[in-house]
Amino acid sequence: MSDTPARLLKLLSLLQTPREWPGGELAERLDVSPRTIRRDIDRLRDLGYPVEASRGSVGGYRLVAGAAMPPLLLDDEEAVAIAVGLRAGAGHAIEGVDEASVRALAKLEQVLPSRLRHQVSALQNATVPLTRGDGATIDPRTLTTLASAATGRERLRFAYRSGDGTRTKRLVEPYRLVSAGQRWYLVAYDLDREDWRTFRVDRVGEPYATGARFAPRPLPVEGAGSEARSEDAAKFLARSMRRMKPELRLDVWFGASAEFVAARLPAHLGAPEPEAGGGCRLRASCTDSLEWVALRLALVDCEFSAQGPPQLVAYLESLGARLTRAALPPPRRRDTADEDRLPAAPEQGRPAAAPEQG
């Protein structure tokens, strides 16, 4: 193979498989001399690929982990597998799958040949993921469109449905996507309203990049600069959500160790502190719904006692009574219609209750 760039790409593709390649085998694969292989290995090292060489009769070359992430070469099957996996994770906003995975998916789909893009879509359409059910499902193509526009600083148009069902058209300068665990949000500057906004991505429809570039604006949070940063977008989203929802100040005692409880609670609720008398106590503020907080506390799977806020205590009491009733056996059906019309017999030693007045 006399074409040096093509030969280097083929050599790199071979080295990115997890094995050690003897120099003679590489030379035979590429139809060059062992001396040419040694020169090509030096070229790859100059480009930042950490290629390790071992001496001896069975020695050879292998690619090892370096200080930086070098470009990867993927074959067709590998590219399809990665794209399908990223789509499945990003589309359901699984906790821990953050904006970086969406950026990776956007980059990968941008360079996928049309035949491979068709395979990815066919595989995803033919499979049904088993999800938790507590977050909205999102079309991964929507996420990649938003991520690409934010990365490329390109103005974006889309249809938006607000919480009360109102439908509007929006023209925005996208800043960053933020994963809030259960949902994805877009932080953007709304050009028509001349203000910053956050948009739930599951309510975004028909997004497309306009092709018009924009100079990034500083996000109105402390310490934000002209460059888009994930931490600034997360701060802005958290502040917006606090304004939209009432804050709950939790005070909950758990009958288990702080380590046990912390491992079973969402990270944004903070860490519980050990109590001198045993167990641990969680004091935190959140803007989650009462229903969601109550269920997450119950899922810790240990004894707990909510000291506040009062609305959480009242909801837990109501929920506990409802769950208790749900565990009771259903009432027995009567055998005849005549018995249904008869009043219930009074208990032994008690008079029958008087009928209600109309």
Image: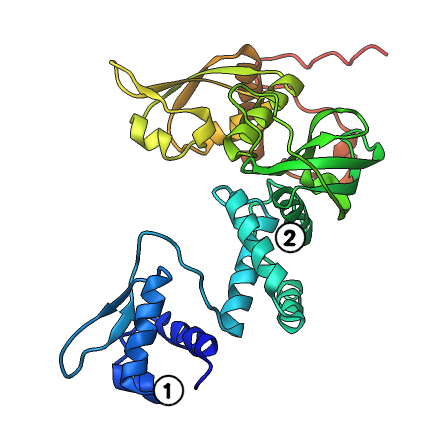
Question: Do tag 2 and tag 1 residues touch (Cβ < 8 Å)?
Answer: no
Camera-side residue of 358 and 3: 3
Q: Check disc 2 and report its element: helix, strand or loop.
A: helix
> In the figure, is residue 207 to the left or right of 58?
right
Residue drawn 67% across the image and 53% down it: 141
**Kind of residue indicated by mark 1:** Arg
Taking the spot 35% from the left edge, 87% from the top edge, the residue there is 32
Percent coordinates x, y for residue 268 in the rendering: 47, 28
- Of residues 249 and 176, the one nearer the viewer is 176
Q: Earlier in the sequence, mark 2 or mark 1?
A: 1
User: What is the crowding at mark 1: few (fewer than 14 residues within 10 Å), some, or many (at least 20)?
Assistant: few
x then y, percent, for residue 125? 67, 64
Lateral position of residue 302 relative to residue 125, left or right = left
Q: Which mark is residue 133?
A: none
- Image quarter in which the N terminus is found: bottom left
Image check: 229 left or right of 91?
Answer: left
Where does the image place residue 15, in percent across and percent down from the top left? 35, 72
The CA span between labels 2 and 1 is 39 Å
State the image quarter where residue 163 is shown.
Answer: top right
Query: Is 314 located above or below residue 46 in the figure?
Result: above
Residue wearing tag 2 = 140
Question: SS at mark 1?
Answer: helix
Coloring scheme of the render? rainbow
